[in-house]
Image (tube, rainbow, N blue to C red):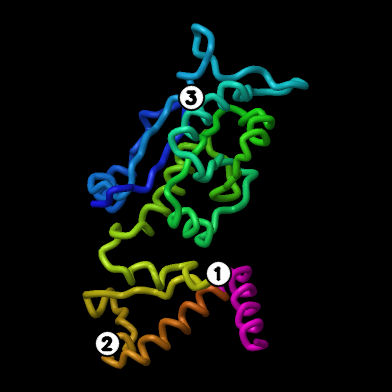
Amino acid sequence: MTDFPWQARVLTLFPDMFPGPLGVSLAGRALENNIWALAARDIRNFATDKHRSVDDTPAGGGPGMVMRADIVAAAIDEAAAELPDVPLVYLTPRGATLTQSRVQDFAKGAGMILLCGRFEGLDERVIEARNVEEISIGDYVLAGGEVAAMVLLEAIIRLLPGVMGSGQSGLEESFETGLLEYPHYTRPREFEGIGIPEVLTSGDHGKVSAWRQAMAEQVTKERRPDLWAAHIGRKSDGDDN
């Protein structure tokens, strides 16, 4: 147990969605063990009318509704007063694509504030006025930012000290080295006529390591040419130094 858990504040219209899947497995145990802490705040609590309205029609016309800058700003300001100097992230398809490198940066900090949009999104003025970092978890659209926030949080939480059983557990996973992960095998030794590659049962750790590296490179080259090109670029830069 740590004295200062990594803190997450989630600003949402649906606080009952949390912790959701973050309350089970590794993240759930870490939450119970005070490695990280979560508070989900209802943005409607900052509404100023009896109907607890948080949205209005878009300026210039068009379909849908837009979350109001003044109400969202009030929610942000309360969370920022509790957690000063932590990243403020808005989950949105137009944001920068989330990477493992950015996840690692978040995990090294003290926590973060996550803003979950709904409807057509947020008034642009609150994004600019509160220096909000926009992040996307992929090129698709969800009904709101809550599920995306859970994805981001789970990616971060598993990297916090004490969450995974072994300090080496994440070192060879996809993206940690810029490559996708190599294939895995376990018992039974033969499954529907397909055996485990002999090198993995040879007992030769050097050959196993070389096979895994070769397979990681092969899988990355076949499935993610963008990652492969970046990997080759890094190797070339290293050779030039």
- Give the amino acid type for the residue marked by disc 3 in the picture: Ile
Give the magenta range: 222-241
Disc 2, disc 3: CB below 8 Å?
no
Q: Looking at the image, which residue sits at the far right?
A: 60
Residue 112, image x, y percentages:
46, 44
Looking at this view, name the residue that lies furthest to the top. Answer: 50
Quadrant location, the C terminus: bottom right
Q: Earlier in the sequence, mark 2 or mark 3?
A: 3
Of badges 3 and 1, nearer the viewer stands: 3
Question: What is the count of numbered marks?
Answer: 3
Q: Vertical placement of 237 versus 5: above or below?
A: below
Task: Give the residue at x 41% y 86%.
Answer: 211
> Which residue in the protein does label 3 denote?
43
Q: Nearer the viewer, residue 108 or 175?
A: 108
Residue at image coords 36%, 92% = 206
Determine the main secondary structure of the stretch shown in magenta. helix
Q: What amino acid does circle 2 point to?
A: Thr
Q: Are marks 3 and 1 in contact (CB under 8 Å)?
A: no
**Cα distance, mark 2 to mark 3?**
55 Å
Question: Is label 3 in a helix, a strand or a loop?
Answer: helix
Q: Which residue carries the number 1 mark?
A: 223
Which x, y percent locates residue 210? 42, 88
Q: Which mark, by number, is residue 201? A: 2
Is the Cβ of the residue at disc 1 closer than 8 Å to that at disc 2? Answer: no
Seen at 41% across and 82% down, the residue is 212
Identified by mark 1, the residue type is: Arg
Tell me, yes or no, whether the highlighted magenta stretch contains residue 29: no
Relative height, residue 71 to residue 169 (above, below)? above
The part of the image, by quadrant, that contains residue 240 is: bottom right
Point out the tag, 1 or 2, that comes first from the N-terminus: 2
The x, y position of residue 55, in whole percent, is 59, 19
Magenta stretch encompasses residue 223: yes
